[in-house]
């Protein structure tokens, strides 16, 4: 186990002894499934009848005209069930849970999107489901908690530590150690101990497989650049993987939050503020202080607000195969507004980071160039944050009236 799952020094599986057999079983099940062509067919079949795959590639004609440079295409992961690429991961892991004969799933969630996706999968497959969520997040993300409970999941509020995502991850591991015979931990991104980075990337690779075929069919050639936002790294690896051997520039965009110089951001690979360490069972760049204490991170996009990053991306960053940039909250809200008005698309605030970086670069490219932006999710979920950012008075009035109804 110790020698597996390393990406030139990053990754690994730093596990308590008691979980080793469970991880061995997971690695075996995953490897067998990966080498079974029937399994990928089963996966594609369920994704096409339950989650709108293949998702289309949309030519952004108006944005292309506005910037006057590269032709801009958008990969529409927002059209997945539950509104983001997260469906690809949870449904794939659900199929593995069936293969292992387990009956219960647990998951951690920060913003709540992964919790909703995992609870949806559990409802579909008939698994029991427990979601761990920090108390601070439970308070901020009530709509997602509401849907998880309607979907039949038990949502457990974590009151340990700083009461956010990393504390929810710790609680999930604690549960797993106690219930590993019946339970699988559905980790939400391409992080954590081996085999999670590889396994989550494998399921998300459906994005790039489709996008590569689609762009070749539409344009007859490959894009010059591909942009994707980077939280844990799963949607970025999902689209990038199919282009690693091509002369295509890959650009991962992290959250610069209030600005890199303020320290209030979540840029692990595009700032100098992160360092290599081991936490949560794997080795990567973490935003931590000299004593290895995790720093507080900030982003307008809750899904990018994470202290670690995929070990696979950390390795590609060191090798120079993927370029990492960051976009500030302000850049992101501007890019979102523009995309809504020009194309009638509403990207998630996370995805809007990729749009913001592409918009900075598109004008300087030639009309022969093609760029691909991964729209990892849809923005309806962000209505509270976006309405605040625009200080929309009619929205504020609506919220006030709603609150008064409950007081009455
Ligand atoms: C969760 C989420 C992300 C961040 O996760 P990655 O693993 O980095 O892809 C990005 N976009 C959306 C819409 C999300 O819901």
Image (cartoon, rainbow, N blue to C red):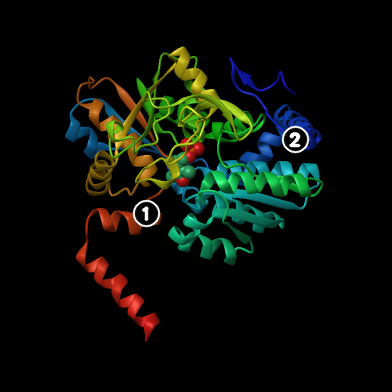
Q: Is residue 405 left or right of residue 137?
A: left
Mark 2 nearby-residue class (10 Å; few <14, some 14–19, many ≥20):
many
Residue topped by disc 1: 382
Element type where label 1 sits in the image:
helix
Q: Position of residue 230 (x, y in %)?
A: 43, 33
Residue at 68% x, 29% y: name it: 14
Residue at 62% x, 49% y: name it: 107
Q: Residue 366's mark?
A: none
Would you say residue 49 is visible in this rendering? no
> Viewer-proximal residue, 291 or 42?
291
Which corner quadrant holds the C terminus?
Answer: bottom left
Would you say residue 402 is visible in this rendering? yes
Q: Is residue 114 left or right of residue 214?
A: right
Residue at 32% x, 48% y: name it: 345
> Viewer-proximal residue, 346 or 164?
164
**Where 25 falls versus 108 (above or below)?**
above
Choose top left, top right, bottom left or bottom right for residue 130. Answer: bottom right
Element type where label 2 sits in the image:
helix
Q: Position of residue 110 (x, y in %)?
A: 50, 49
Choose top left, top right, bottom left or bottom right for residue 343. Answer: top left
> Viewer-proximal residue, 37 or 169?
169
Q: Position of residue 26 (x, y in %)?
A: 75, 35
Q: Position of residue 190 (x, y in %)?
A: 56, 33
Q: Residue 26's mark?
A: 2
Residue at 38% x, 82% y: name it: 407
Whether label 1 lies within 8 Å of ligand 1 gets the answer no
């Amino acid at each position: 186990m110790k020698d597996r799952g390393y990406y030139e020094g990053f990754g690994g599986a730093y596990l308590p002894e008691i979980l080793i057999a469970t991880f061995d079983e997971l690695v075996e099940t995953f490897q067998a499934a990966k080498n079974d062509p029937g399994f990928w067919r089963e996966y594609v079949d369920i994704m096409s009848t339950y989650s709108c795959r293949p998702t289309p590639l949309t030519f952004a004609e108006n944005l292309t005209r506005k910037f006057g440079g590269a032709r801009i295409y958008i990969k529409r992961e927002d059209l997945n069930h539950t509104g983001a690429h997260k469906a690809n991961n949870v449904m794939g892991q659900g199929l593995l849970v069936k293969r292992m004969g387990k009956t219960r799933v647990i998951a951690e969630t920060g913003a709540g999107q992964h919790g909703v996706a995992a609870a949806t999968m559990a409802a579909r497959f008939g698994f029991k489901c427990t979601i761990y969520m920090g108390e601070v997040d439970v308070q901020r993300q009530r709509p997602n908690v509401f849907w998880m409970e309607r979907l039949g999941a038990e949502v457990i509020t974590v009151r340990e530590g700083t009461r956010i995502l990393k504390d929810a991850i710790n609680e999930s591991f604690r549960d797993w150690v106690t219930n590993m015979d019946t339970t699988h931990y559905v980790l939400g991104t391409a992080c954590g101990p081996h085999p999670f980075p590889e396994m989550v990337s494998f399921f998300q690779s459906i994005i790039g497989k489709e996008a590569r075929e689609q762009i070749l069919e539409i344009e007859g050639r490959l894009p010059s650049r591909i942009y994707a936002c980077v939280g844990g790294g799963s949607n970025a690896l999902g689209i990038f993987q199919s282009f690693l051997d091509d002369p295509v520039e890959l650009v991962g965009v992290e959250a610069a939050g209030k600005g890199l110089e303020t320290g209030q951001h979540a840029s692990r690979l595009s700032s100098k503020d992160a360092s290599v360490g081991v936490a949560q069972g794997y080795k990567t760049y973490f935003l931590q202080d000299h004593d290895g204490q995790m720093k507080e991170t900030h982003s307008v996009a809750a899904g990018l607000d994470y202290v670690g990053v995929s070990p696979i991306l950390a390795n590609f960053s060191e090798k120079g195969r993927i370029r990492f940039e960051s976009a500030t909250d302000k850049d992101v809200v501007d890019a979102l507004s523009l995309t809504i008005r020009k194309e009638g698309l509403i990207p998630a605030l996370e995805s809007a980071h990729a749009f913001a970086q592409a918009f900075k670069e598109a004008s300087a490219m030639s009309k022969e160039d093609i760029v691909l932006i991964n729209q990892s999710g849809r923005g309806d979920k962000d209505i509270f944050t976006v309405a605040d950012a625009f200080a929309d008075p009619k929205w504020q009035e609506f919220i006030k009236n709603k609150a008064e109804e409950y007081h009455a």
